[in-house]
Amino acid sequence: MSQFPIIIKPSLLEQALTATPKSEPYQPPVIPSPGAKPKRFKTGLLVAQGVVFTVIALVPAFFGEFILAAVLLAATVGVILAQVNNQRVEYPRKLRIWEEKVRGYEYEMRVAEQKKKAHAERMARLKTPEGILEYRREQVKKALGNTRLPDGDNSDAPLGNAERFFLTVLERYFPGKVFTRRYINSPPPSDRYYTPDFTFIEPEYRLFMDIEIDEPYEYKRGKPTHFIGSDDERNRHISERYGWVVIRFTEEQVIRQPESCCKVIAGVLAEITLASTPLEPFAGVPDLLPEPQWTEGQANAKAIAKYRDTYQHLLPQPEKRKPKPQEPVKPKKEFQPSHALLSILIRSGSTPFLLWEYTVYAGRLGGQFFLFAKDNAWVNLITTSHPSAGLEPDDSQGSHIIM
């Protein structure tokens, strides 16, 4: 039975990580020879030409044609002399061309010797641990060179509580390399798509990783999920057709051991890049405890027992938002009378009944001072005065006129 974390690499990447350099025999280049050094005079050719032409010239003499023979013999001598002169003139040019060929040949031989030496050194280096590491790093880059990019970055798949929690941990250890909402088209004829919980991208190596959090069942319906065999087609499609690495954790591993899960990711990154640097931040983090992958029946049993409740309470609870403090209600600005400056009372004769009253008040309203007149209500604004005018309510004097 397989165990979590489940790590699936593309087959080409697996081959590159275990590749062993082969010894290649050196293939020397074909370098044309410059040939023999040219001679100043081609004596053999001149002698041969002289013999042939002399014999031809003597034939007419044998038949008594001495004049013709003499002409032919003179022509023979002329041709031979012309050949001698031509060779004398052409010799420096031919010698120069030959010397250039010799220099080029010697240069090509030196380069070939250097290449042969470098090849021998490279073959010797490939047998060392450093050489094997360098060779495998080259093979890894070739294997990842054709990795397919996501088909989109606007998936509407929601993040669960565990995903949101783990995302904060991933971003702390791998800033700028973890993304959500990327998706991959599923195999035809389906028009659906797969949305990785997290897409890890290492641009230097063109490395893409699909990081998944697997729950044993759907929380609300109790339907078994991610049991043995249920994700095989998806894993093959993402790994082989797209060239991605797939890493699957259980929900419980992510909640109980989030740093250890990140250490697993860093370990995969270190294995693929053939470098120990990714693991340096996890020197004090314990290794992730493995968990067996469940069958469909075991997932059903977990759903009945509500197994996810045994660890989901460990998730940090979101802070409750404090209600905004209510701003105190500002009282309406009302005119506050301070002193009556003038009151006019009209009575009827000596009766105690008041027929009409008119009073002038001074007071403050909104930082300014006002004079108000009142009979039965505040109805008449007589005048206003700013504090700089020197009119203060406390300094005002009231007077009453009774009629």
Image (tube, rainbow, N blue to C red):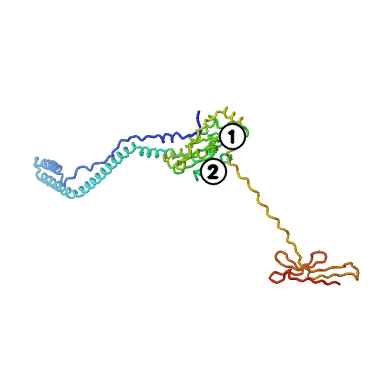
Along the viewing direction, whichever of 302 and 141 lies nearer the viewer: 302
Q: In the figure, is residue 219 to the left or right of 146?
A: right
Please state which amino acid type lies under the numbered disc 2: Thr
Image x and y of residue 94, in percent: 21, 47
Q: In the rendered picture of this protein, how many numbered marks are placed on residues?
A: 2
What residue appears at the point 56 percent right and 40 percent down from the top-left corner?
163
Disc number for residue 168:
2
Rounded to the nearest angstrom, the CA distance separating label 2 from label 1 is: 22 Å
Disc number for residue 83:
none
What residue appears at the point 71 percent right and 57 percent down from the top-left corner?
330
Res. 240 visible in picture: no
Query: Which quadrant of the structure image shows residue 206?
Result: top left
Disc number for residue 310:
1
Along the viewing direction, whichever of 35 and 246 lies nearer the viewer: 246
Q: In the figure, is residue 111 to the left or right of 302?
A: left
| 341 relative to 290, above or below | below
Q: Secondary structure at mark 2?
A: helix
Image x and y of residue 253, in percent: 53, 36
Task: Tell me if mark 1 has few (under 14), some (14-19) or many (20+) residues whose alpha carbon lies within 10 angstroms of its own.
Answer: few
